[in-house]
Amino acid sequence: MASGRFAFAVAAVVAFAAGSLPVAAVASSPAAQLNVRVASTGVYAVRLTITTTASGSDSVAVVIGSLSRRVTTGRDGRALVTADVALRTRTLTIRASTRWAKPTLAASLRRISSLPASAKPGHGRGRGSAGRTRSSGPHGSTGATGAATTSLSGTNAGPAGPTAAISVTAATASTGATGTTGPTGSTGSTGSTGPRRTGSRGSTGPTGPTGTTGSTGATGPTGSAGPTGSSGSTGTTGPTGSTGPTGSTGSTGVSGSTGPVGVGGSWNLVFDDEFNGSALDTTKWSSSWFNQNGVMNNTSTSPANVSVAGGVLTLTLSSTSVGALVSTNPTGGASSGFQITYGYIEARILFAGQGSTCDDWPAFWTDGQSWPADGEIDIAEGLGTLTSNYHSNAGANNSNTIPGSWCGSWHTYGVDREPGINTIYWDGQPIRSYASNDGGAPQYIILNIGSGQGTDAPGTTMQIDYVRAWTH
């Protein structure tokens, strides 16, 4: 989930046959256009390499067909863009303009499938470090994304215009897409203890029987009348019955958490799912990206890969192209959903992998309705190793590797979101804190598993014991 950075250039026309190799073009002005021709309509994989002459980052306005946004190149003036584009005509137009330097573009198209019969224009936004594909976003006036195509931004697509699911990676001279690996901590974290469940309260023991009341002693005879006749003696009182034993008190069950792990203060629980049922609670969650099997982290998000059993939510990567996702976005398919401004969000998760090495591309994160202006908090994201990142209009603030043994065992992950600052906690310990500039916009909760970062292992899972949120 790194920031989207890309730039384009050139005014040229290039003809492609299906499955053709890359063709590069060079522009000599800050505003440039590239018209790419193909042999037939269909869905094409597009790869763009962009280079500017700026000595550092450069802001670039980009248009791919009807899709547009403004992005930033890397410090070396380069960026890589990949996209799957549905072409209903035989020409794709790409335009770009910069503020400071002249862009150069090398492009290749490869036909990967025919157009689906039900495909139609959609709306969304691109995002991700090292190529996260993000589609079917909540912006734009066009209706829901079709099953095979999605788009980058809110620009309306014409009836014959291309739509795309785009991922962007800023190329840097010295650092790979996922950053360098930090040193491994000297001590591995404690192994898995299994999901933690809330125990039931033991029943109260039965009350012992009440003792019987002793009988009343007989009254003595009345003395005979005489001048001063004496009174008869009073009979003795019978013994009092003994009281039955008191029943024993049942044992008390384990109570649930009253606040975030390792974080003090006064908190009010405002969201809680312990996954104690047999199916996903659809009043709280949608079971795919925008309830349309949308693409996230290089995979489609299939509801069939989401399951609840034994107090655990399980997300499965069934293949390198089909993963899983759940979201509390009330505009993305959750019946009631959930969003939070300031407060604390926490989940207990088992990521696939071993020690410091994490499989697949899993993530626990929050996002606003307008990306990146409303912010994105990557509480825990597997990019080969486990990281924690942040994105906003100011760009990316990434952690690189967090030392430790995080994958293959259960751990808690959370964020304390306060005005102007976010603090990330893993297992109740603060691992990083940074300034935020998203204005405290409401954000919803997302958990997903995709492919293309760590070692892809189809059949592996991401397991979640609980998800909770508190406010002050």
Image: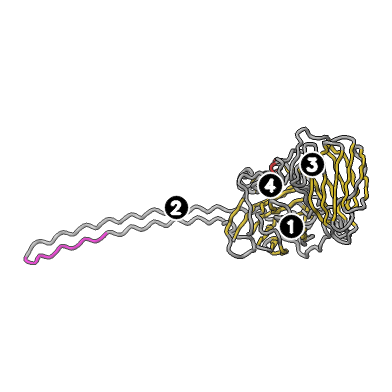
Label 2 vs 4, first from the N-terminus:
2
Q: Are marks 3 and 1 in contact (CB under 8 Å)?
A: no
Q: Which residue is mark 3?
A: 163
In the rendered structure, which amino acid carries the disc numbered 3?
Thr
Q: CA distance from mark 3 to mark 4?
A: 25 Å
Q: Nearer the viewer, mark 2 or mark 1?
A: 1
Label 3 vs 1, first from the N-terminus:
3
Q: Which mark is drawn over residue 347?
A: none
Whether residue 305 is situated above or below residue 76 in the rendered picture:
above
Give the x, y percent position of residue 363.
73, 52
Q: Are marks 2 and 1 in contact (CB under 8 Å)?
A: no
Magenta includes 223? no
Please state if 467 lies on the left or on the right of 103 as rendered. Answer: left
Q: Secondary structure at mark 3?
A: strand
Q: Which residue is mark 1?
A: 392
- Looking at the rendering, the stretch of residues picked out in magenta corresponds to 227-237
Q: Residues within 10 Å of mark 3 (few under 14, many from 20)?
A: many
Q: CA distance from mark 3 to mark 1?
A: 25 Å
